[in-house]
Image (cartoon, rainbow, N blue to C red):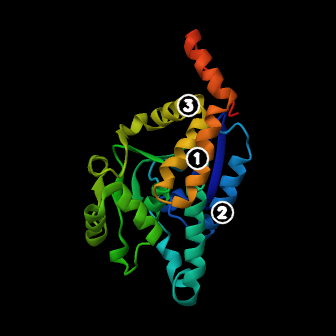
Amino acid sequence: MPGIGTERDGAVGTLIIDNPTRRNAMTADMYSAVPAAIEELLAEPELRVIVLRGAGQEAFGAGSDISEFPTRRLGDKAPSYDNAEHAAWEALAAIPIPVLAAIHGPCMGGGIAMALHCDIRIAADDATFAVPPARLGLAYPQDALYRLIELVGPARAKLLLYSARVFDAAQAERMGLVQEVVAKADLEDHVSTVATQIARLAPLTHRATKLSVNSFRDASLESAAAEARSACYDSADFREGVQAFLDKRHAAFHGH
Protein backbone atom coordinates (compact mmCIF):
# COMPACT_ATOMS: atom_id res chain seq x y z
CA MET A 1 0.00 0.00 0.00
CA PRO A 2 1.56 3.34 -0.99
CA GLY A 3 2.34 5.65 1.89
CA ILE A 4 4.81 7.80 3.77
CA GLY A 5 6.86 5.85 6.28
CA THR A 6 8.93 6.96 9.23
CA GLU A 7 11.89 5.45 11.05
CA ARG A 8 14.11 6.68 13.85
CA ASP A 9 17.64 5.69 14.84
CA GLY A 10 18.74 7.75 17.82
CA ALA A 11 18.94 11.42 16.83
CA VAL A 12 18.30 10.71 13.13
CA GLY A 13 14.80 10.28 11.71
CA THR A 14 13.91 9.04 8.24
CA LEU A 15 10.95 10.01 6.09
CA ILE A 16 10.29 7.37 3.42
CA ILE A 17 8.49 7.83 0.09
CA ASP A 18 7.02 4.34 -0.07
CA ASN A 19 5.46 3.32 -3.38
CA PRO A 20 8.15 1.10 -4.92
CA THR A 21 5.89 -0.65 -7.44
CA ARG A 22 5.48 2.74 -9.16
CA ARG A 23 9.08 3.89 -8.60
CA ASN A 24 7.93 5.82 -5.52
CA ALA A 25 5.58 8.11 -7.41
CA MET A 26 3.64 10.35 -5.04
CA THR A 27 -0.13 9.82 -4.89
CA ALA A 28 -2.49 12.51 -3.63
CA ASP A 29 -2.97 10.55 -0.42
CA MET A 30 0.79 10.33 0.04
CA TYR A 31 1.11 14.11 -0.28
CA SER A 32 -1.65 14.46 2.29
CA ALA A 33 0.18 12.12 4.67
CA VAL A 34 3.48 14.04 4.67
CA PRO A 35 2.65 16.71 7.30
CA ALA A 36 1.44 14.14 9.86
CA ALA A 37 4.49 11.92 9.25
CA ILE A 38 6.79 14.89 9.85
CA GLU A 39 4.86 15.82 12.99
CA GLU A 40 5.29 12.26 14.23
CA LEU A 41 9.07 12.43 13.79
CA LEU A 42 9.37 15.88 15.36
CA ALA A 43 7.48 14.70 18.45
CA GLU A 44 10.78 13.05 19.47
CA PRO A 45 12.57 15.78 21.46
CA GLU A 46 16.04 14.33 20.83
CA LEU A 47 15.67 14.31 17.05
CA ARG A 48 18.45 16.31 15.38
CA VAL A 49 18.32 15.42 11.64
CA ILE A 50 15.76 14.05 9.17
CA VAL A 51 16.64 12.11 6.00
CA LEU A 52 14.16 11.92 3.12
CA ARG A 53 14.57 8.88 0.86
CA GLY A 54 12.67 6.57 -1.43
CA ALA A 55 11.82 3.00 -0.46
CA GLY A 56 13.75 0.17 -2.08
CA GLN A 57 16.72 0.38 -4.41
CA GLU A 58 15.14 1.52 -7.69
CA ALA A 59 14.08 5.14 -7.25
CA PHE A 60 13.93 8.18 -5.00
CA GLY A 61 10.72 9.42 -6.55
CA ALA A 62 9.37 9.29 -10.10
CA GLY A 63 7.21 12.36 -9.49
CA SER A 64 3.48 12.61 -8.96
CA ASP A 65 1.44 9.54 -9.92
CA ILE A 66 0.10 10.63 -13.32
CA SER A 67 -2.37 7.72 -13.40
CA GLU A 68 -4.40 9.67 -10.81
CA PHE A 69 -4.58 12.86 -12.84
CA PRO A 70 -7.74 12.07 -14.84
CA THR A 71 -9.74 11.53 -11.64
CA ARG A 72 -7.93 13.73 -9.11
CA ARG A 73 -6.19 16.60 -10.91
CA LEU A 74 -8.39 17.71 -13.79
CA GLY A 75 -11.13 20.32 -13.68
CA ASP A 76 -12.56 21.37 -10.34
CA LYS A 77 -10.57 18.69 -8.50
CA ALA A 78 -7.23 20.32 -9.33
CA PRO A 79 -7.19 22.80 -6.39
CA SER A 80 -7.61 20.02 -3.81
CA TYR A 81 -4.73 18.04 -5.32
CA ASP A 82 -2.53 21.11 -5.59
CA ASN A 83 -3.27 22.10 -1.99
CA ALA A 84 -2.18 18.66 -0.73
CA GLU A 85 0.99 18.87 -2.79
CA HIS A 86 1.86 22.34 -1.50
CA ALA A 87 1.07 21.39 2.11
CA ALA A 88 3.55 18.51 1.85
CA TRP A 89 6.28 20.81 0.53
CA GLU A 90 5.55 23.47 3.13
CA ALA A 91 5.75 20.89 5.91
CA LEU A 92 9.17 19.78 4.63
CA ALA A 93 10.41 23.36 4.36
CA ALA A 94 9.15 24.20 7.87
CA ILE A 95 11.11 21.42 9.60
CA PRO A 96 13.28 23.29 12.13
CA ILE A 97 16.19 20.84 12.03
CA PRO A 98 18.48 19.92 9.10
CA VAL A 99 16.89 17.80 6.37
CA LEU A 100 18.90 15.70 3.90
CA ALA A 101 17.56 14.14 0.71
CA ALA A 102 19.24 10.82 -0.14
CA ILE A 103 18.58 10.40 -3.86
CA HIS A 104 19.07 7.27 -5.96
CA GLY A 105 17.60 6.34 -9.32
CA PRO A 106 14.92 8.55 -10.90
CA CYS A 107 14.12 11.87 -9.23
CA MET A 108 11.54 13.50 -11.47
CA GLY A 109 8.98 16.31 -11.33
CA GLY A 110 7.24 16.07 -7.98
CA GLY A 111 10.17 14.02 -6.67
CA ILE A 112 12.51 16.89 -7.44
CA ALA A 113 10.04 19.25 -5.75
CA MET A 114 10.20 17.14 -2.59
CA ALA A 115 14.02 17.19 -2.71
CA LEU A 116 14.08 20.95 -3.36
CA HIS A 117 12.34 21.55 -0.03
CA CYS A 118 15.14 19.77 1.85
CA ASP A 119 18.30 21.56 2.99
CA ILE A 120 20.91 19.36 1.30
CA ARG A 121 20.66 16.85 -1.54
CA ILE A 122 23.09 13.91 -1.73
CA ALA A 123 22.83 11.72 -4.83
CA ALA A 124 23.99 8.27 -5.82
CA ASP A 125 25.82 8.07 -9.12
CA ASP A 126 22.83 6.27 -10.68
CA ALA A 127 20.47 9.17 -9.92
CA THR A 128 18.70 10.88 -12.81
CA PHE A 129 16.80 14.16 -12.79
CA ALA A 130 14.11 15.72 -14.95
CA VAL A 131 11.43 18.37 -14.61
CA PRO A 132 8.87 17.23 -17.21
CA PRO A 133 5.71 19.40 -16.92
CA ALA A 134 6.13 20.45 -20.56
CA ARG A 135 5.44 16.83 -21.52
CA LEU A 136 2.03 17.11 -19.83
CA GLY A 137 1.01 20.70 -20.45
CA LEU A 138 1.35 21.66 -16.78
CA ALA A 139 3.02 24.71 -15.23
CA TYR A 140 5.62 23.83 -12.60
CA PRO A 141 4.40 25.16 -9.22
CA GLN A 142 5.79 28.56 -8.31
CA ASP A 143 7.25 27.67 -4.91
CA ALA A 144 9.13 24.67 -6.34
CA LEU A 145 10.27 26.79 -9.31
CA TYR A 146 11.60 29.48 -6.99
CA ARG A 147 13.68 26.93 -5.09
CA LEU A 148 14.92 25.44 -8.35
CA ILE A 149 16.05 28.89 -9.52
CA GLU A 150 17.85 29.45 -6.20
CA LEU A 151 19.90 26.30 -6.75
CA VAL A 152 20.64 26.31 -10.48
CA GLY A 153 19.91 29.87 -11.63
CA PRO A 154 17.26 31.16 -14.05
CA ALA A 155 18.86 29.95 -17.29
CA ARG A 156 19.41 26.38 -16.10
CA ALA A 157 15.92 26.29 -14.60
CA LYS A 158 14.56 27.26 -18.01
CA LEU A 159 16.69 24.58 -19.66
CA LEU A 160 15.31 21.93 -17.28
CA LEU A 161 11.72 23.06 -17.86
CA TYR A 162 11.85 23.91 -21.56
CA SER A 163 13.58 20.68 -22.58
CA ALA A 164 12.22 18.18 -20.00
CA ARG A 165 15.59 16.48 -20.53
CA VAL A 166 16.94 13.81 -18.21
CA PHE A 167 20.21 14.81 -16.52
CA ASP A 168 22.56 12.42 -14.76
CA ALA A 169 23.98 12.86 -11.26
CA ALA A 170 27.26 14.42 -12.41
CA GLN A 171 25.39 17.01 -14.49
CA ALA A 172 23.04 17.71 -11.57
CA GLU A 173 26.02 18.30 -9.28
CA ARG A 174 27.69 20.66 -11.76
CA MET A 175 24.55 22.77 -12.06
CA GLY A 176 24.09 22.88 -8.26
CA LEU A 177 20.94 20.80 -8.08
CA VAL A 178 22.68 18.33 -5.74
CA GLN A 179 25.55 19.02 -3.36
CA GLU A 180 27.34 15.65 -3.38
CA VAL A 181 27.47 12.53 -5.56
CA VAL A 182 28.70 9.17 -4.26
CA ALA A 183 28.69 5.60 -5.54
CA LYS A 184 25.26 4.01 -5.17
CA ALA A 185 26.70 1.26 -2.96
CA ASP A 186 27.99 3.95 -0.60
CA LEU A 187 24.94 6.22 -0.50
CA GLU A 188 23.26 4.82 2.61
CA ASP A 189 26.47 4.75 4.65
CA HIS A 190 27.58 8.18 3.45
CA VAL A 191 24.24 9.83 4.23
CA SER A 192 24.22 8.09 7.62
CA THR A 193 27.71 9.44 8.34
CA VAL A 194 26.76 12.97 7.34
CA ALA A 195 23.54 12.83 9.37
CA THR A 196 25.38 11.49 12.42
CA GLN A 197 28.05 14.19 12.13
CA ILE A 198 25.36 16.88 12.01
CA ALA A 199 23.44 15.30 14.90
CA ARG A 200 26.50 15.46 17.16
CA LEU A 201 26.94 19.20 16.69
CA ALA A 202 25.12 22.08 18.35
CA PRO A 203 21.38 22.03 17.55
CA LEU A 204 20.92 25.68 18.51
CA THR A 205 23.55 26.62 15.94
CA HIS A 206 21.75 24.54 13.31
CA ARG A 207 18.45 26.23 14.12
CA ALA A 208 20.04 29.69 13.87
CA THR A 209 21.76 28.75 10.63
CA LYS A 210 18.58 27.41 9.03
CA LEU A 211 16.50 30.43 10.00
CA SER A 212 19.22 32.88 8.97
CA VAL A 213 19.77 31.30 5.56
CA ASN A 214 16.03 31.00 4.94
CA SER A 215 15.51 34.64 5.92
CA PHE A 216 17.24 35.62 2.67
CA ARG A 217 14.26 34.04 0.89
CA ASP A 218 11.62 35.10 3.40
CA ALA A 219 12.31 38.37 5.21
CA SER A 220 9.57 37.60 7.75
CA LEU A 221 11.93 35.04 9.30
CA GLU A 222 14.61 37.61 10.20
CA SER A 223 13.18 38.32 13.66
CA ALA A 224 13.10 34.60 14.53
CA ALA A 225 16.59 34.22 13.06
CA ALA A 226 17.92 37.06 15.21
CA GLU A 227 16.37 35.48 18.32
CA ALA A 228 17.90 32.12 17.42
CA ARG A 229 21.33 33.68 16.97
CA SER A 230 21.04 35.46 20.31
CA ALA A 231 19.91 32.24 22.02
CA CYS A 232 23.18 30.58 21.03
CA TYR A 233 25.22 33.07 23.06
CA ASP A 234 23.01 32.64 26.12
CA SER A 235 23.06 28.85 25.99
CA ALA A 236 24.59 26.13 28.11
CA ASP A 237 25.63 24.53 24.82
CA PHE A 238 27.87 27.52 24.01
CA ARG A 239 29.57 27.25 27.40
CA GLU A 240 29.94 23.50 26.89
CA GLY A 241 31.38 23.98 23.41
CA VAL A 242 34.01 26.44 24.64
CA GLN A 243 34.95 24.25 27.62
CA ALA A 244 35.13 21.14 25.43
CA PHE A 245 37.48 22.96 23.06
CA LEU A 246 39.70 24.00 25.96
CA ASP A 247 39.59 20.47 27.39
CA LYS A 248 40.37 18.98 23.94
CA ARG A 249 37.32 16.69 24.03
CA HIS A 250 34.09 16.29 22.07
CA ALA A 251 31.31 18.54 23.30
CA ALA A 252 28.03 17.07 24.54
CA PHE A 253 25.29 19.35 23.22
CA HIS A 254 21.72 19.22 24.54
CA GLY A 255 19.96 22.04 22.70
CA HIS A 256 19.66 24.52 25.54
The mark found on residue 159 in the picture is none
Q: Residue at x 57, y 48 (%)?
A: 225
**Residue to which mark 2 is pinned:** 33
Farthest residue in the top direction?
247
Q: Residue at x 60, y 22 (%)?
A: 241
Q: Nearer the viewer, mark 3 or mark 2?
A: 3
Q: Position of residue 238 (x, y in %)?
A: 62, 27
Of the 4 image quadrants, the one containing the N terminus is bottom right
Give the amino acid at mark 3: Thr
**Residue to which mark 3 is pinned:** 196
Q: Nearer the viewer, residue 117 or 107?
A: 117
Q: Residue at x 69, y 27 (%)?
A: 236
Q: Alpha-carbon distance for marks 3 and 2?
A: 26 Å
Q: Alpha-carbon distance for marks 1 and 2?
A: 32 Å
Left/right placement of residue 154 relative to residue 58 reads left
Give the amino acid at mark 1: Ala
Q: Nearer the viewer, mark 3 or mark 1?
A: 1
Left/right placement of residue 146 relative to residue 166 reads right
Q: Alpha-carbon distance for marks 3 and 1?
A: 27 Å
Q: Nearer the viewer, residue 230 or 60?
A: 230
Dot 1 or dot 2: first in sequence order is 2
Q: Nearer the viewer, residue 92 or 247?
A: 247
Q: Position of residue 182 (x, y in %)?
A: 36, 37
The mark found on residue 226 in the picture is 1
Label 2 element class: helix
Q: Position of residue 228 (x, y in %)?
A: 61, 43
The answer to the question of whether label 3 and label 1 lie on touching residues, with beta carbons closer than 8 A, is no
How many residues crowd around disc 3 within 10 Å: few (fewer than 14), some, or many (20 or more)? Answer: some
Q: Nearer the viewer, residue 209 or 163?
A: 209
Q: Is residue 18 visible?
A: no
Q: Position of residue 183 (x, y in %)?
A: 36, 37
